[in-house]
Image: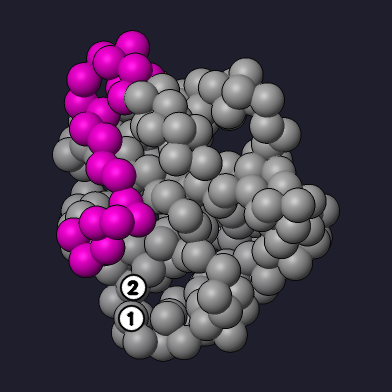
Amino acid sequence: MNRGRFITVEGIEGVGKSSNIGVLVEHIEQAGFEVLTTREPGGTPLAEDIRNLLMHRGDETIPEIAELLLMFAARSLNVNNNIKPALEAGKWVVCDRFTDSSRAYQGGGRGLPMEVINHVADWVHGELWPDVTILLDAPVEVALGRANHRGAPDRIEREKHEFFARVRECYLNLANAEPDRFVVIDTTRSLEDVQADVMLLVQRLLSNN
Ligand code: Z5A
């Protein structure tokens, strides 16, 4: 059986990942493919426990390196227990964040060296990289303005504007460096316009399948 396609969705918080993943998955399913939808950190019971530790434990300082390693520990679980088996079974996989988040947040945001992150990534998932990465992009003030309308912020969401500006810049640099993998979608427009772009992208992927 053919290996399914691996699609990741990235961006700073509030850019609209959750608002667009549903449309993305629905379109692929309508074309007759089975889809595994997953997220990082998380996706398996143990990885979801790691997510809870990362997002909500405010009682102990988490050094940047511990944060990075916990992200990759969760990723190792998700890759081996979810993503690889699904792809091997011919399913498509849509993952809300993947290693580009570690590059952008722990690299761009926290300042950890990119070569260390890439080395750990190589160790954890080797040659498995997304076929397509959708980078939903908006200026920090737009994205955070939307995110702020929600409930109490988690540990990472409490970071300052400059942190998210570095994360966004890193994402845009990653997209420039790998134009064949990344598709950047401007989400300052209406949700309908953004979703229309997402649907066009899916049609393109399906016609190349
Ligand atoms: N993290 C990390 O540091 N390193 C890693 O390796 C990984 C993750 C994997 C959890 O991510 C945190 O983990 C994240 C990075 C870190 N921390 N932060 N920040 P997450 O993905 O679970 O959480 P999030 O980034 O906060 O995403 P989110 O809550 O899912 O937000 P979103 O999906 O991007 O946005 P949304 O919920 O779809 O939309 C936000 C609001 O805007 C909502 O009210 C929508 O109705 C509205 N919206 C969306 N699009 C539009 C448009 N186009 N117009 C108007 N309004 C809109």
Q: Is residue 127 above or below residue 81?
A: below
Find residue 66 and report its horizontal and vertical position in percent.
55, 79
- Could you tell me the amino acid type at mark 2? Gly
Q: Is residue 194 left or right of residue 6?
A: left
Its colouring scheme is one colour
Residues marked 2 and 1 touching at CB (< 8 Å): yes
Question: Is 181 colored magenta in this rendering?
Answer: yes
**Hey, which quadrant is residue 81 in on the image?**
bottom right
Q: Is residue 96 visible?
A: no
Q: Is residue 83 above or below residue 72?
A: above
Q: Going 41% across and 62% down the picture, which residue do you hit? A: 100
Q: Which residues are magenta?
A: 175-198
Circle 1 crowding by C-alpha within 10 Å: few under 14, some 14–19, many from 20: some
Find residue 167 and report its horizontal and vertical position in percent.
28, 58
SS type, badge 2: helix
**Hey, which quadrant is residue 26 in on the image?**
top right
**Toward the viewer: 94 or 77?**
94
Question: Is 41 colored magenta in this rendering?
Answer: no
Q: Which residue is mark 1?
A: 114
- Could you tell me the amino acid type at mark 1? Met
Q: Which residue is mark 2?
A: 107
Circle 2 crowding by C-alpha within 10 Å: few under 14, some 14–19, many from 20: many
Q: Is residue 28 above or below residue 117?
A: above
Q: Going 41% across and 87% down the picture, which residue do you hit? A: 116
Q: Which comes before the other along the chain, label 2 or label 1?
A: 2
**Toward the viewer: 136 or 67?**
136
SS type, badge 1: helix
Q: Going 57% across and 48% down the picture, which residue do you hit? A: 5
Find residue 201 and report its horizontal and vertical position in percent.
37, 32
Find residue 144 and report its horizontal and vertical position in percent.
29, 36
